[in-house]
Image (tube, helix red, strand yellow):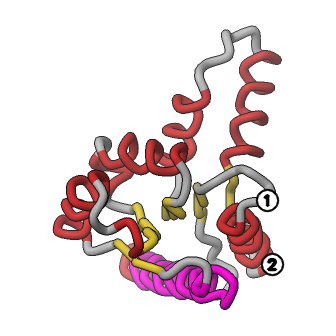
Amino acid sequence: MAKLPVSVFVCGPSEPQDLLCKKKIDIVNALRENSHDAMLGEEEVEELKQRDRASGRPVRLDNVYENEIASAADVVVILRGSPGSVAEFHEFFQNPNIEAKMYVFADGAHDAGYSSAGALNMHELLQGKVVRYKSPDDITNCTIKTRVQEIVSNFQAAKWIRQQHIA
């Protein structure tokens, strides 16, 4: 089972000085160390653009590539902590195939906001895949990273069990 990688698309803030951005990169590195296919939009989108350029296809908008990445991933993790990551959440929430595999980490300090009172609560009701954290404590104490690793480990076990029934 340990050799069964899980593809995980990790989304979140992209400003290098942002604590949550640093945690996003830390999460991706930890998952990669455990032989998972952990992906960052910043890396993957550029690679997909280069692929299109090389084949003579027009370059598409970044969100089109991110939807492609999210659709192909086993698990999508959104660290909802910036305007861009809130937008990613809302866009992915509209796609049932992505929404079903999406885990959203949301700062509890924003529970009264429009996004939390609407789409986030709806996602939680439909999927139960919302993890509320307290900033900055849960970011610096690695609570978020540990929880993502648990989610991926549980998904890996479920994926392995499913494969045993197919074989």
Asked if labels 2 and 1 touch by Cβ distance under 8 angstroms, the answer is: no
Q: Say which mark, if any, is on residue 33.
A: 2
Q: Residue at x 79, y 59 (%)?
A: 17
Picture quarter with the N terminus? bottom right
**In the rendered view, would you say 152 is above or below 19?**
below
Q: Position of residue 165 (x, y in %)?
A: 37, 80
On screen, residue 95 above or below 134? above
Image spot of residue 67 (x, y percent): 49, 38
Q: Which mark is residue 17?
A: 1
Tell me the kind of residue under disc 2: Glu
Q: Residue at horizontal 65%, vertical 66%?
A: 20
**Foreground mark, 1 or 2?**
1
Magenta stretch, residue numbers: 137-164
Disc 1 marks a residue whose amino acid type is Gln
Q: Circle 2 — which element?
A: helix
Q: Residues within 10 Å of mark 2 (few under 14, many from 20)?
A: few
